[in-house]
Amino acid sequence: MNDNDLLRYSRHILLDDIGIEGQEKLLSSHVVIIGVGGLGSAAAPYLAAAGIGKLTLIDHDLVEMTNLQRQIMHNNNSICMSKVASGKKMLNQLNPQTQIIEIEQKATSELLDELLPHASAVLDCTDNFKTRHLINAACVKHQIPLISGAAIGFDGQVTVIDPRIANSPCYACVFPEDQVFDEVKCSTMGVFSPLVGIIGSIQAAQALQVIAQIGQPLVGKLLFWDARTSQSNEIQLHKQTTCKTCS
């Protein structure tokens, strides 16, 4: 690190659990964020500010007026702009030292196979069940930690999947791919604006913990957050021996 880095990240370096060694791990890391909506808009700025060396943003959507109630990387001038371009513009202003890669397309197995071998962690900030399973399968395949978040209405949840740990359950262990349920989205159910900020920030914190090896990330645990009561609950998750993805 140079003098500018030591100054910029001094408040991290002062933390015994991070220090210079931990900050250097962050500076040399690459985080892939899939979904640059509410969750991604909250997670990406904190990761850039914290000094993640490279951020790859993946999203195929354009910014719409209805996004602005919660997707804080975007603003009025971003309407009709691609979300990844809007996000890159904001993040470059926040921390020019972080390299931002924008990919304006849907996540595919081929794309993830190309990116993940060079990634330190992946954030799933999507709202699509099929895409979540695709991301999970790719992370299991390439042994890359996955921080999965979800938010709808007033309820949010976060878990960390770390395929490098033998007993770490994957997303499919908890939510089997053949499970039948009614998929709901913000466009029909609504979402409390600060909720995505809370869940996205937790995702960012979990990514930093995994990369810098701080504390105990939510591996094998599912954290629930109720924005109505400001109460959180946590349940233990277990790896399923019959899981078609990780077993």
Image (cartoon, helix red, strand yellow):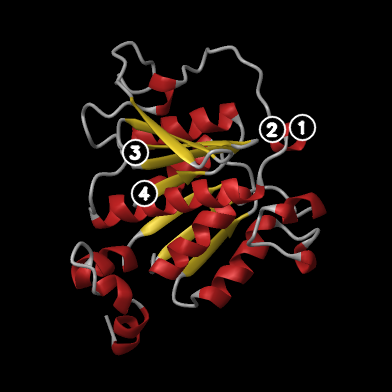
Q: Quick check: marks 2 and 1 in contact, CB under 8 Å?
A: yes
175 relative position to 39: left or right: left
Residue appearing at x 39%, y 67% in the figure: 50
Residue pointed to by mark 4:
206
Expressed as whole percent of the image width and height from the top left, the position of residue 194 reads: 60, 51
Split into 4 quadrants, where in the image is the C terminus? top left
- Label 3 sits on residue: 142
Tell me what residue is drawn at x 66 percent, y 44 percent: 192
Q: Estimate the spatial distance between the alpha carbons at disc 4 and disc 2, rounded to whole Å.
A: 24 Å
Residue 211 occupies quadrant:
bottom left
SS category of the residue bearing label 2:
loop
Task: Identify the mark nearer the N-term, 1 or 3.
Answer: 3
Q: Are marks 1 and 4 in contact (CB under 8 Å)?
A: no
Residue at mark 2: 185
Q: What amino acid is found at the position of numbered circle 2 in the picture?
A: Lys
Q: Earlier in the sequence, mark 4 or mark 2?
A: 2
Q: Mark 4 and mark 3: span between their CA atoms?
A: 19 Å
Residue 40, percent from left and from top: 56, 52
In front: 154, or 181?
154
